[in-house]
Image (cartoon, rainbow, N blue to C red):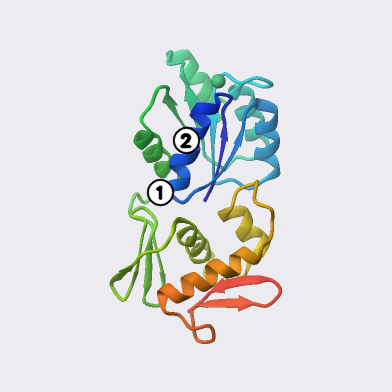
């Protein structure tokens, strides 16, 4: 899952970024409205966090213009404003939710999870043979036994399971699991795949994670 933070206060952006990275999200940042909108339109994100007061373009303008091009991706406003009028303006511009500064990271995280959760409200779980990955609980089990994965290993396995039965191209994996500053040596994916296979005890030939030579990987039973 990849998130874009558009926030001009460096300290806040860093604080959110660190927290989200610890939760295995890939995070990009932009410190003004123009760059933020450009990045939001050029890359695929699962969610946008937009500050209200921004140089270049206001958060409201960024949100409105982003919505004209993309109706799906959830947007959460970070705002010091809390008058009813401002809240309504934000929601009318296409935001899904807003959080008032200062906030506790745990609350922001919960709001993000609500937006990314499937509509059923149940725990989002993926299965691959005897492997179960629970997105909300952030756990992986094989035959009922918990397997400890690093944040990136978890994010990579989650991406493959979300796309089970489909070929995952290397470039798409990088886009979803690593951030924009990644230097694009997709060889890193192989290193992580090998680590995941090892921890899950999957052998290369008979395993559930298949190498599609020259293209990428596919999770398939
Ligand atoms: Ca600001």
Determine the residue located farthest toward the bottom in the rendered image: 206
Between 45 and 152, the one lying in front of the other is 152
Q: Left or right: where does residue 70 sit relative to residue 27?
A: right
In the image, what residue occupies the spot 45% across and 56% down? 151
Measure the C-alpha gap from mark 2 to mark 1.
25 Å
- State the mark number for residue 20: none
Q: Which residue is mark 1?
A: 119
Camera sees residue 45 = yes
- State the mark number for residue 16: 2
In the image, what residue occupies the spot 65% across and 51% down? 182
Determine the residue located farthest toward the left in the rendered image: 144
Give the secondary structure at mark 1.
loop
**Residue 42 appears at what percent x and percent y?**
71, 43
Q: Residues within 10 Å of mark 1 (few under 14, many from 20)?
A: few
Q: Residues within 10 Å of mark 2 (few under 14, many from 20)?
A: some
Q: Quadrant location of residue 139?
A: bottom left
Q: Counting residues from the N terminus, which is met first, the one under dot 2 or under dot 1?
A: 2
Between 96 and 100, the one lying in front of the other is 100
**Residue 214 appears at what percent x and percent y?**
71, 74
Question: Is 7 above or below relative to 199?
Answer: above
Give the secondary structure at mark 2.
helix
In the image, what residue occupies the spot 58% across and 53% down? 178
**Residue 6 appears at what percent x and percent y?**
58, 31
In the image, what residue occupies the spot 71% across and 35% down? 38
Question: Is 154 above or below relative to 82?
Answer: below
Camera sees residue 115 = no
**Residue 126 appears at what percent x and percent y?**
41, 65
Count of marks overlaid on the render: 2
Question: Is 74 above or below relative to 100?
Answer: below
Q: Left or right: where does residue 183 sit relative to residue 202?
A: right
For ligand 1, give the image quadrant. Answer: top right
């Amino acid at each position: 899952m990849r998130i874009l933070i558009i926030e001009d206060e460096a300290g806040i952006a860093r604080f959110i970024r660190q927290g989200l990275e610890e939760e295995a999200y890939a995070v990009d940042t932009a410190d003004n409205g123009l760059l933020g909108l450009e990045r939001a339109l050029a890359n695929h994100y699962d969610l946008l966090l937009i500050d209200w007061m921004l140089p270049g373009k206001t958060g409201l303008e960024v949100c409105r213009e982003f919505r004209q091009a993309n109706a799906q991706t959830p947007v959460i406003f970070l705002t010091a404003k809390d008058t009813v009028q401002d809240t309504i303006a934000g929601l009318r511009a296409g935001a899904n939710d807003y959080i008032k500064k200062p906030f506790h990271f745990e609350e922001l995280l919960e709001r993000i999870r609500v937006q990314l959760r499937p509509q059923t409200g149940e725990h989002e779980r993926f299965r691959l043979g005897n492997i179960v990955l629970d997105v909300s609980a952030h756990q992986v089990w094989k035959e009922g036994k918990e397997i400890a994965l690093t944040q990136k290993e978890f994010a990579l396995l989650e991406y493959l399971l979300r796309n089970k039965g489909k070929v995952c191209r290397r470039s798409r994996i990088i886009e979803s699991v690593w951030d924009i500053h990644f230097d694009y040596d997709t060889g890193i994916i192989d290193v992580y795949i090998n680590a995941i296979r090892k921890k899950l005890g999957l052998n290369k030939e008979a395993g559930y994670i298949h190498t599609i030579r020259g293209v990428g990987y596919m999770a398939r039973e």
